[in-house]
Amino acid sequence: RFSVIQTAPPDAILGLTEAFNADPNPGKMNLSVGVYKDENGQTPILKSVKAAEQKILDSEATKGYLSIDGLPEYRADVRNLVFGETLAADRVAVLQTPGGTGALRVAADFMQTQLPKARIWMPNPTWANHPAIFSAAGLPSETYRYLGDDRTSLDLDGMLGALDDNAKPGDAILLHGCCHNPTGIDPTPEDWKQIAAVIAKKNLLPLIDFAYQGFGDGIEQDAVGLRTVLEHVDEAIVCTSFSKNFGLYSERVGAVSLVAADAPQCAAALSQLKRVVRTNYSNPPRHGGAIVATILADEQLTELWKEELETMRLRITKLREQFVETMKSTGSGHDFSFLLRQKGMFSYSGLSPMQVDELKSKHGIYIVGSGRINVAGMSETKMNSFCEAVASVLS
Ligand code: PMP
């Protein structure tokens, strides 16, 4: 029976990292995988996380199961970070999930079973796992226009027109809360108002993927889009990931938050979300959620975390600036200043698949085929050689 099974294609991005690890080139750089890196190419554990883990180690009394929806204090923290003071607590159900991916899958299963007529509209392009998760859940998906013809800006009119013309009331729309992956192109606060108005007019359910809070303009600033949408509609689902902003990638820390029109509807939806969880992984892992809750329960650790998050954010901004300036000095004639308007770890560089290939084979620089670069994979000390390599494949 297993003899008939065909090998599935490898994950394109993780495959690149395998090739990177095997590359003997001492000057190699990995700008492919979506993980924050420091100047030395490392992804260290935050000091606030280490301190919280020490506290947990000293005080943890049981490894008993959590409830299906996770740690209560963690769930309150998620609500505060995502929604602030904007919503009545009894209209929001928060469930701790294994990462943002777990949150998306729970949301997708919930929609597929409870909103059987809904299709989900995804931006084109989007994170490759989005269509894969929706398809795995059996949720029909469609795409809406997002990227302008210049491939460096948002086509807002195209996006709104596509939704207005094609989305049906009851459909869902996937939005990246901030730091759009893979383009780095985010709507402005003004754009968000127009997006929110179309969502309200067409009666769409917003599903907001919020995987980079704090990596764009700041913790509160990055929630502006999501909160604008919630001023226009009374139902939404938000998928949170703390992989990036707490550096907790392998601990699988996320949450799905459902906003309902009133408390009874919220309670009914929560019961269905719990059913989805129960049949998927039963209940979430404790450790990562406990780290976040321990940090946010302690004023000093919270301050330290905010500083560490700010350091990561500012490093990315600085690398964007340095890259744009250094590219100017190579005389390649290509203007990369659009990178300064983009947010978060990623940008579409405009490099073609052939140029991406040449960077890998000749220079040991690893970028995904679409030309998406992880800006955090750049390094100040290697910026000159990196930009010379980019200039050489552009010429
Ligand atoms: N959404 C987006 C847009 C992402 O880029 C990622 C991580 N690459 C996730 C969700 C999922 O993150 P996690 O690792 O927490 O599952």
Image (tube, rainbow, N blue to C red):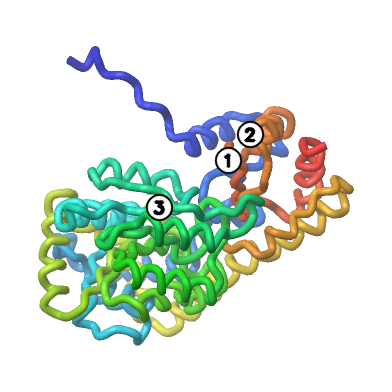
- Residue 336, given in percent of the width and then of the height, sits at 74, 54
**Is residue 377 at all visible to an observer of this figure?**
no
Q: Residue furthest top?
A: 3
Q: Helix, strand or loop at disc 2?
A: helix
Q: Residue at x 74, y 62 (%)?
A: 321
Q: Amino acid at mark 3?
A: Met
Task: Kindly indicate the quadrant of the structure image that contains residue 282.
Answer: bottom left
Q: Residue at x 21, y 17 (%)?
A: 2
Which residue position is annotated with label 1? 370
Q: CA distance from mark 3 to mark 1?
A: 18 Å
Which residue position is annotated with label 2? 353
Q: Earlier in the sequence, mark 3 or mark 2?
A: 3
Q: Helix, strand or loop at disc 3?
A: strand
Q: Amino acid at mark 1?
A: Ser
Q: Tell me whether circle 2 and circle 1 mark residues in contact (CB < 8 Å).
A: yes
Q: Residue at x 85, y 45 (%)?
A: 332
Task: Kindly indicate the quadrant of the structure image that contains residue 172.
Answer: bottom left
